[in-house]
């Protein structure tokens, strides 16, 4: 299954960045170990501080055994006199996950009596907190005020999830899902060179019904589009992801600034894209939109008995979403895709050039969908990429997040 976590774990463009992970007292402490493993998969270096509260649930040895380095001792242990300053000097970002109500209060007040609070106070880079606590503690006016203070200071709040809590009560307070934690951790580390952009990403297939229960479609999973949505979001853009049906629910995490709209048919996708267009500064068109829609056989289920010798379906053309919007391009930057079955790289590049001109885009990425590991339903892609300035490159098979990252860079420079 391709989900956001598998796409992010294979992402290599933040490799060798350093994140400091703070772990404070919550039953969700064990999830910090999983976050550490996922960050390591993406070759991100992680150091860890486990607070005294968290040590009731997990021991620092867990994190050092999983490869975190360093794992800091308690304050005044005598081991490292300047350990409270080190993350601020060596790490690109700091995330506390889980963040207890107590830790959040200490940070809001600027207290520094324990190692993690002091490290946060001495950290000038991007900071995030992922709260986890009982609903009443989360809703308490004191916590609300502390969270508001942190937001004012540009601390990223990774909103807790709602559901059944460890104490058995229902409500908001569960540590955010792993896909959100991982994406937010990476966003803290990413450059913000797409800040101010509003990006429309179309993704997935469309389904064109031919009777009340059956449809005409294709095998797109939305992985390529979800990767672009995540990459642009990490780099500071506001993103509207416009997805066809059947997209896995775990593919596009619920993140602030990344809106997901689900549609079914090409015409619905066209309507929603046109509504969004006035607000959009960049368009990325990865959706495998059905070029034709079957003429409907009726609103109910087509019965075999009504045509025992077989039957034909007639098709009518669907709107070309990219071509329609590119005619209203103005100063927007556009990325188009091409799903091709080319005999070799030279043919793929020739098809990419043709589609760049035909669709009127700044960058065109063609994937050979007949090549193993490339195109539909894979976590990887190989591409022929061209831009309107005449730049051309063949990209070997690599993870879709890496492809998406590099396409964002091309679009910014095209
Ligand atoms: O979703 P995945 O499983 O990750 O697979 C990724 C992918 C193979 C779907 C993706 O990499 C890809 O190739 N997307 C484009 C598929 C496609 O429809 O290509 P096309 O050559 O038919 O269309 C050219 C461009 O016009 C595309 O940007 C397409 O989104 C757009 N288009 C096409 C037809 C149409 N009616 N409206 C459109 O906007």
Image (cartoon, grey):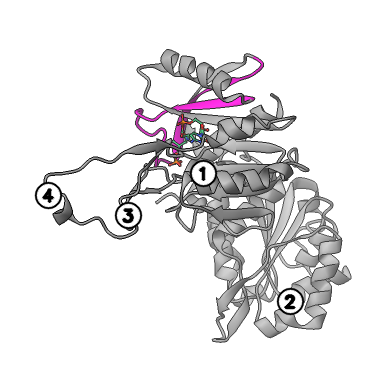
Residue 259 forms part of the magenta stretch? no
Q: Are marks 2 and 3 in contact (CB under 8 Å)?
A: no
Give the mark toward the camera: 4 or 2: 4
Q: Do the residues labelled 3 and 1 touch (CB within 8 Å)?
A: no
Give the side of residue 1 with respect to residue 167, left or right. left
**Spatial distance from mark 1 to mark 4, Cα to Cα?**
37 Å
Give the x, y percent position of residue 49. Answer: 69, 62
Q: Residue at x 20, y 57 (%)?
A: 303
Report which residue position mark 2 lands on: 101
Q: What element carries label 3?
A: loop
Residue 371 forms part of the magenta stretch? yes
- Mark 1: C-beta under 8 Å from nearest atom of ligand 1: yes
Residue count near mark 3 (Cα–Cα under 10 Å), binned few <14, some 14–19, many ≥20: few
Q: Which of 20 and 390 is in front in this view?
A: 390
- Mark 4: C-beta under 8 Å from nearest atom of ligand 1: no
Report which residue position mark 1 lands on: 203
Q: Which residues make up the magenta segment?
A: 362-389
**Residue 111 in view:** no
Going from N to C along the chain, the mark reached first, 2 or 3, is: 2
Q: Nearer the viewer, residue 238 or 383?
A: 238
Give the mark toward the camera: 1 or 4: 4
**Spatial distance from mark 2 to mark 3, Cα to Cα?**
58 Å
Report which residue position mark 3 lands on: 298
Tell me if residue 309 comes above or below residue 159 in the rendering: above
**Residue 283 in view:** yes
Q: Do the residues labelled 4 and 2 touch (CB within 8 Å)?
A: no
Give the x, y percent position of residue 18. Answer: 68, 46
Residue count near mark 4 (Cα–Cα under 10 Å), binned few <14, some 14–19, many ≥20: few
| Residue 308, numbered label | 4
**Spatial distance from mark 4 to mark 3, Cα to Cα?**
17 Å
Tell me if residue 414 comes above or below residue 258 in the rendering: above
- Mark 2: C-beta under 8 Å from nearest atom of ligand 1: no
């Amino acid at each position: 299954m391709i989900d956001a976590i598998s796409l992010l774990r294979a992402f290599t463009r933040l490799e060798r960045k350093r994140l400091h992970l703070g772990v404070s007292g919550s039953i969700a402490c064990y999830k910090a170990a999983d976050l550490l493993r996922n960050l390591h998969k993406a070759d991100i270096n992680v150091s860890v501080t486990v607070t005294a509260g968290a040590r009731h649930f997990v021991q620092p040895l867990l994190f050092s055994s999983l490869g975190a380095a360093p794992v800091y001792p308690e304050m005044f242990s005598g081991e490292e006199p300047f350990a409270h300053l080190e993350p601020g000097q060596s790490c690109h970002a700091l995330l506390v996950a889980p963040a207890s109500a107590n830790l959040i209060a200490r940070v809001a007040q600027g207290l520094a009596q324990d190692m993690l609070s002091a490290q946060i106070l001495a950290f000038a880079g991007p900071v995030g907190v992922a709260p986890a606590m009982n609903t009443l503690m989360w809703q308490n006016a004191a916590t609300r005020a502390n969270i508001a203070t942190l937001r004012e200071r540009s601390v990223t709040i990774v909103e807790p999830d709602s559901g059944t809590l460890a104490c058995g009560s229902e409500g908001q307070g569960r540590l955010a899902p792993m896909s959100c934690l991982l994406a937010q951790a990476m966003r803290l580390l990413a450059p913000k060179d797409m800040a101010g952009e509003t990006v429309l990403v179309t993704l997935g297939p469309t389904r064109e019904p031919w009777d009340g229960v059956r449809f005409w479609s294709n095998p797109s999973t939305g992985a390529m589009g979800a990767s672009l949505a995540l990459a642009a979001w990490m780099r500071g853009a506001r993103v509207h992801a416009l997805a066809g049906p059947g997209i896995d629910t775990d593919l596009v995490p619920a993140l602030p600034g990344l809106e997901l709209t689900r549609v079914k048919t090409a015409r619905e996708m066209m309507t929603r894209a046109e509504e969004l267009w006035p607000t959009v500064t960049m368009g990325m068109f990865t959706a495998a939109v059905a070029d034709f829609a079957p003429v409907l056989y009726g609103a109910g289920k087509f019965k075999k008995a009504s045509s025992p010798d077989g039957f034909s379906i007639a098709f009518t053309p669907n709107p070309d979403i990219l071509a329609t919007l590119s005619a209203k391009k103005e100063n927007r930057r556009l990325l188009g895709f091409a799903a091709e079955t080319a005999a070799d790289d030279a043919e793929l590049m020739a098809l990419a050039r043709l589609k760049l001109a035909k669709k009127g885009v700044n960058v065109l990425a063609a994937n050979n969908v007949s090549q193993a590991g490339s195109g539909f339903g894979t976590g990887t892609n190989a591409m022929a990429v061209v831009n309107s300035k005449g730049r051309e490159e063949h990209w070997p098979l690599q993870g879709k997040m890496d492809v998406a990252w590099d396409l964002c860079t091309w679009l910014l420079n095209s």
